[in-house]
Image (cartoon, coloured by chain):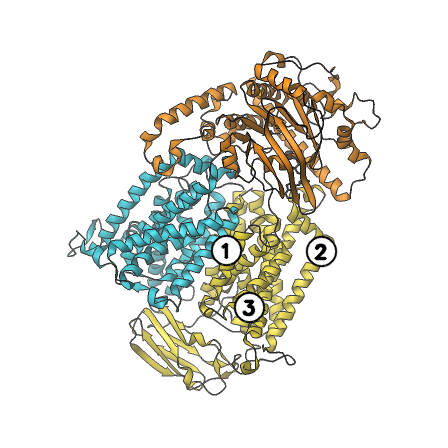
Chain colours: A orange, B yellow, C cyan
């Protein structure tokens, strides 16, 4: 884990960054779901707003990316000097609801881009569209300069754009090691005819296993290699899913809420991993609700609300943007919610709370076993 | 928990065994084929019936006596074809289904096997003045409405519990069997018997959920496992029916021979009981759909179908809703069984035989949607009948199942269904 | 009661034609359901493809025996592809409904009067196994077996070929499921979308699994067609598929020997109850008013149903399975 991560633990309610804002509407949210489980990790009370400091430069790739982004205009759809991903006029409707309506978006190569926005903003749906898991009503996008809209998910992934899921998809009846091996690309033994002739793929398999163990070690999962993935804790599954995605050495990783449901200690190490991906030359796009996390590692922030990109820019600039604050709070204050909406949000919040409590108790029991 | 489940299973089996013990013909040595020709309530005498063995050689011939009774002794177990000579039927009497004049049966050792040749005036009489496709449309609607009764329950159960219930057909059979028991064995008029059957089915459905499915849900049994359990349950129950009822077809006592009637100048003719069946089915369906949309409980049901945990979070008693859905679904299936028994006679496998059509209907409409199930059923009913314009009637179900596959190819979530979310 | 006869009958049933036929068909089903998680409820159609492919080629079209075998195998490949194209993109429960519907379509076509000249209608087809039995190395002047468990020379020949195929396919399944290919397949069973996100063409893998399991099912069709000397469409109805599921789950899904053990157990248990009941009736232990000879057949179906319910409720991993690696769980 990089040293610079050890100092300040990210924590606190998701929209703490708004506290420092003089705007009167920046009161605590009525129904904001608490982000941390009960009584562990630094609590919200001890949190003090950080002064906005200039970003620390962590690697060559980082320097190049920051330099490139410093020239980009902080406004929705702004062009980047070296975009790896470009999307145009992407629209997805579910019945009457327009879940995604993105006019233009570019993602700078070698950067860490955070995609933020309130619940239901369309972030996951946008991910699904870009990675081929869902079909848009309109729109096109390119990856590395080539059109990939319309490609099925596995082809997108083979091009070098790999995603993870908001709800983890650990393959629970496979061992952790097998989960990892599955991520490797170009395996000869994955063809039916070759599978029956082990000599054809045994050597490659050994190489894949070595690489898998290496990654597992980096993610501190090496001692779990032989166990069923189903026995891992929620946070470990997040780690496994990320590690598995890396087995294919992608150029672009899309992480959907990689820190959700992960306790603060693990969050820190996950953050370290995300940064090291960028430092290894990958581009990272990730969805996150915790603004501390975003401020820490994102080079660029894209804000979605009600399906469209409403703001873009470096973390500090975006977080001071009125449109962003409105997107998070405006709906609650100005437009009265319909009863269904209210119920839906309430239930969603409750579910999340429940999940976090379960997660927390699971993690606690894991940690309880480890510490004397 | 295991003991409770075992108790529940035992209770279920006992409840099923309590189904009337239906008389089967007295045992005697030697195999034969026998039956009784009736046209409504009158016996049909002097009709030639003969049997041939698997090789095609005739091994026996007889004529029905004054009571309509006939029997052909057989040389031993094996496969025989028994044929009714339609030429020898009296004027104005015809086989209800002319395709059934010749039937091949597998005869087991020591079995005296009843063979029924359903007679009636059929629609042959009024047929001259009907236009075939209109007639078929009317019949398709009738069949569609009847299967819709069962399909709506199947779909609601899927919607609220996620269970694809392969034993739903057995609830249909249960309705017909109970109505038969009250009607034929106890001489109760069919309307009363049918009403009782529907009530019993409703109770049986609720009990099935309380004692069986509810317990499995609490044990967190997976949905796929539950689906396979429903297959096992269907096998168990179906053969209990056969054990008790025998393998033959039996008719209710009432409304057997009715002349087809043409409604004011329209080019189709159905028996009065068919009009009544359609009316009753339509009324029941409208009632259920209205209840789903208008009443609190109905809305709660739809809420549970939409998102069970959300519904539970907003204070709905999910278990109660599911129990109610089972009771109503089973009652509707029972009603479908009574009406189907009226249309085609009662048989232990009648529900199983329409199960795939129910699935086709429900899938077409989108699993989980009640209105979709109704729509799908009507499409299936119409398609089955109208396809006989081009294909032979024995293949009419092939077309319906083929349509199911084609529609899923185009629209995998069904006509009214919604796509699932990913990620 | 003649317990000796009851037990030898049970063993003969489990090891005989029925046992080997079910073992083959269930090995195919295990690839579908156990490893790939495909809820194929149309396995009986693949068996029918094998049986009817052989019977129709030889007895209707007068083709040589080997061509019949090739047509049976080819037919099952074509069926798998035709079935797979519309269904493999569907959710598990839709897949179940569509496959059962497709199997029913095939059964209705095979027994239809319109195609009677080709498939023999409800009477089915006979007289196609001559060439196979000409190659029979067992002289037919005696029975083969040990300790009262004996088979005719014809049955012994069919069983020799059948069990050899079972052994071959068990090795094949073992090798495949320990290869990267098998790993992808098992992963698909767990979560398709995760596998897609890792760049695997899930659809192609499912199709390969469907074809492979279907072809193995078709070899079961050859065995039953040769062993019984006649094929009838109604013996390949959906109940056959349900029986195959019962056998597979009994032995343990997603295990190499699960389907084999399951098939042997399934038929032994059926024969056992059947014979016990028949003897009890014959000896007057069960009176005629409770159960007659014909009703024994129905009791056997009831037991299958009850067995399926109890297995899944209490031991979904099968008799010998390990619950931890159970293929089937909450979904
Ligand atoms: N398959 C679907 N059918 C209907 N509506 C959908 C579907 N998938 C998503 N939606 C709707 O689209 C909107 C955007 O959902 P999405 O999951 O993309 O939000 P999100 O930004 O990822 O939210 P969160 O932060 O809570 O994960 C929501 O209103 C959601 O209800
Ligand atoms: Mg999301």
Residue B87 in which image quadrant: bottom left
Gap between marks 3 and 2, in whole Å? 27 Å
> Foreground: A118 or A350?
A118
Mark 2 or mark 1: which is in front?
A: 1
- Report the residue at 33% width, 65% height from top: C118
Q: Position of residue B361 (x, y in %)?
A: 56, 59
- Report the residue at 63% width, 67% height from top: B281
Q: Which residue is mark 3?
A: B340
User: Looking at the image, is mark 3 or mark 1 earlier in the sequence?
Assistant: 3
User: Looking at the image, is mark 3 or mark 2 earlier in the sequence?
Assistant: 2
Left or right? Give the position of C122 relative to C136. Answer: right
Gap between marks 3 and 1, in whole Å? 26 Å
User: Looking at the image, is mark 2 or mark 1 earlier in the sequence?
Assistant: 2
Q: Please give the chain letter of the residue carrying mark 1.
A: B
Q: Please give the chain letter of the residue carrying mark 2.
A: B
Q: Position of residue A23 (x, y in %)?
A: 83, 25
Q: Which residue is mark 1?
A: B405
> Foreground: B406 or B327?
B406
Mark 3 near ligand 1 (CB under 8 Å)? no
Of the 4 image quadrants, the one containing the N terminus of chain B is: top right
Left or right? Give the position of C317 relative to C142. Answer: right
Within 10 Å of the Cα at label 3, are there few (<14), some (14-19), or many (20+) other Cα atoms?
A: many
Do discs 3 and 1 share a chain?
yes
Q: Position of residue B98 (x, y in %)?
A: 45, 77
Within 10 Å of the Cα at label 1, are there few (<14), some (14-19), or many (20+) other Cα atoms?
A: many
- Report the residue at 58% width, 70% height from top: B137
> Foreground: C199 or B398?
C199
Q: In this rendering, is residue B68 above or below A177?
A: below
Q: Are marks 3 and 2 in contact (CB under 8 Å)?
A: no
Residue B293 is marked as: 2
Q: Please give the chain letter of the residue carrying mark 3.
A: B
């Amino acid at each position: 884990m990089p040293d610079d991560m050890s100092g300040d633990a990210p924590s606190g309610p998701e929209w703490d960054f708004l506290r420092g804002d003089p705007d009167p509407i920046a009161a605590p949210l009525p129904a904001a779901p608490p982000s941390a489980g009960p009584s562990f990790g630094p609590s919200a009370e001890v949190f003090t707003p950080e002064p906005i400091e200039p970003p620390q430069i962590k690697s060559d790739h980082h320097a190049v990316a920051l330099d490139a982004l410093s020239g980009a205009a902080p406004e929705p759809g702004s062009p980047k000097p070296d975009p790896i991903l470009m999307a145009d006029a992407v629209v997805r409707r579910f019945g009457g609801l327009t879940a995604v309506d993105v006019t233009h978006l570019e993602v700078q190569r070698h950067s860490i881009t955070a995609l933020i926005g309130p619940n239901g903003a369309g972030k996951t749906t946008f991910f699904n569209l870009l990675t081929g898991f869902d079909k848009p009503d309109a729109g096109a996008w390119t990856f590395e300069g080539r059109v990939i809209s319309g490609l099925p998910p596995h082809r997108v992934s083979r091009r070098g754009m790999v995603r993870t899921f908001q709800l983890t998809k650990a393959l629970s009846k496979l061992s952790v090691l097998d989960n990892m091996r599955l991520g490797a690309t170009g395996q000869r033994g994955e063809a039916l005819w070759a599978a029956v002739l082990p000599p054809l793929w045994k050597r490659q398999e050994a190489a894949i296993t070595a690489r898998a163990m290496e990654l597992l070690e980096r993610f501190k999962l090496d001692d779990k290699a032989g166990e069923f993935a189903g026995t891992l804790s929620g946070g470990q599954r997040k780690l496994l899913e990320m590690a598995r995605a890396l087995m294919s050495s992608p150029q672009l990783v899309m992480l959907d809420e990689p820190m959700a449901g992960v306790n603060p200690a693990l969050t820190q190490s996950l953050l370290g991993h995300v940064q090291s991906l960028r430092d290894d030359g990958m581009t990272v796009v990730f969805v996150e609700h915790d603004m501390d996390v975003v401020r820490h590692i994102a080079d660029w922030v894209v804000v979605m609300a009600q399906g469209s990109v409403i703001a873009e820019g470096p973390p500090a600039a975006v977080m001071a943007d009125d449109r962003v604050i409105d997107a998070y709070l405006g709906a609650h204050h100005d437009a009265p919610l319909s009863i269904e909406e209210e119920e839906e949000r309430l239930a969603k919040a409750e579910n999340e709370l429940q999940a976090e409590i379960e997660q927390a108790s699971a993690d606690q029991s894991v940690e309880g076993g480890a510490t004397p | 928990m295991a003991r409770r489940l075992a108790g529940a299973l035992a209770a279920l089996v006992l409840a099923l065994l309590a189904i009337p013990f239906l008389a089967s013909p007295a045992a005697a040595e030697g195999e034969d084929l026998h039956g009784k020709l009736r046209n409504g309530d009158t016996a049909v005498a002097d009709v030639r019936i003969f049997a041939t063995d698997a090789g095609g050689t005739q091994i026996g011939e007889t004529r029905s006596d004054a009571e309509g009774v006939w029997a052909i002794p057989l040389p031993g177990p094996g496969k025989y074809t028994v044929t009714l000579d339609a030429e020898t039927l009296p004027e104005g009497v015809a086989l209800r289904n002319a395709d059934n004049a010749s039937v091949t049966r597998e005869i087991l050792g020591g079995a005296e096997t009843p063979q029924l040749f359903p007679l009636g005036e059929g629609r042959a009489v009024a047929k001259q003045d009907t236009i075939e496709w209109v007639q078929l449309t009317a019949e398709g609607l009738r069949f569609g409405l009847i299967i819709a009764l069962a399909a709506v329950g199947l779909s609601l159960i899927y919607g609220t519990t996620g269970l694809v219930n392969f034993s739903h057909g057995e609830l249909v059979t249960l309705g017909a069997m109970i109505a038969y028991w009250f009607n034929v064995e106890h001489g109760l008029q069919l309307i009363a018997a049918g009403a009782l059957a529907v009530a019993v089915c409703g109770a049986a459905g609720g009990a099935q959920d309380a004692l069986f499915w509810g317990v499995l849900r609490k044990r967190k049994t997976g949905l796929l496992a539950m689906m396979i359990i429903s297959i096992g349950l269907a096998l168990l129950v179906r053969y209990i029916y056969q054990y008790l009822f025998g393998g033959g077809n039996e008719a209710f006592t009432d409304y057997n021979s009715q002349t087809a009637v043409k409604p004011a100048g329209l080019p189709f003719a159905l028996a009065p009981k068919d009009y009544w069946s359609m009316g009753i089915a339509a009324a029941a369906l409208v009632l259920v759909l209205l209840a789903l949309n208008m009443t609190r409980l109905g809305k709660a049901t739809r809420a549970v179908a939409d998102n069970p945990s959300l519904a539970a979070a907003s204070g709905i008693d999910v278990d109660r809703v599911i129990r109610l859905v089972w009771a109503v679904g089973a009652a509707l299936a029972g009603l479908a069984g009574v009406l189907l028994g009226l249309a085609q006679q009662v048989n232990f496998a009648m529900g199983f035989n329409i199960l795939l059509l129910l699935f086709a209907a429900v899938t077409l409409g989108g699993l989980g949607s009640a209105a979709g199930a109704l729509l799908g059923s009507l499409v299936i009913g119409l398609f089955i009948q109208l396809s006989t314009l081009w294909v032979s009637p024995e293949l009419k179900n092939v077309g319906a199942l083929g349509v199911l596959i084609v529609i899923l190819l185009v629209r995998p979530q069904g006509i009214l269904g919604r796509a699932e979310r990913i990620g | 009661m003649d317990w000796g006869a009851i037990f030898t009958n049970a063993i003969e049933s489990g090891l005989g034609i029925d046992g080997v036929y079910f073992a083959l068909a269930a090995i195919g089903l295990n690839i579908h359901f156990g490893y790939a998680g495909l809820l194929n409820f149309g396995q009986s159609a693949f068996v029918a493809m094998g049986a009817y492919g052989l019977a129709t080629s030889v007895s209707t079209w007068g083709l040589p025996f080997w061509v019949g075998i090739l047509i049976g195998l080819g037919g099952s490949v074509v069926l798998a592809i035709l079935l797979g194209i519309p269904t493999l993109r569907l959710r598990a429960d839709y897949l179940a409904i569509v496959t059962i519907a497709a199997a029913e379509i095939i059964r209705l076509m095979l027994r239809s009067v319109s195609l009677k000249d080709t498939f023999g209608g409800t009477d089915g087809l006979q007289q196609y196994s001559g060439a196979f039995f000409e190659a029979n190395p067992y002289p037919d002047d005696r029975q083969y077996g040990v300790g009262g468990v004996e088979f005719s020379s014809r049955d012994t020949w069919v069983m020799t070929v059948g069990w050899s195929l079972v052994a071959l396919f068990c090795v094949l399944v073992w090798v495949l499921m320990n290869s990267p290919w098998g790993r992808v397949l098992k992963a698909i069973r767990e979560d398709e979308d995760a596998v897609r996100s890792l760049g695997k063409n899930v659809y192609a893998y499912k199709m390969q699994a469907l074809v492979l399991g279907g072809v193995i099912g078709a070899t079961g069709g050859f065995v039953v067609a040769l062993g019984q000397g006649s094929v009838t469409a109604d013996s390949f109805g959906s109940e056959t598929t349900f029986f195959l599921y019962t056998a597979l789950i009994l032995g343990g899904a997603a295990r190499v020997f699960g389907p084999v053990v399951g098939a042997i157990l399934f038929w032994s248990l059926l024969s056992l109850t059947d014979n016990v009941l028949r003897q009890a009736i014959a000896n007057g232990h069960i009176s005629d008013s409770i159960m007659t000879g014909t009703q024994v057949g129905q009791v056997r179906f009831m037991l299958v149903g009850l067995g399926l319910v109890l297995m899944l409720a209490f031991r979904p991993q099968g008799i010998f399975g390990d619950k931890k690696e159970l293929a089937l769980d909450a979904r």
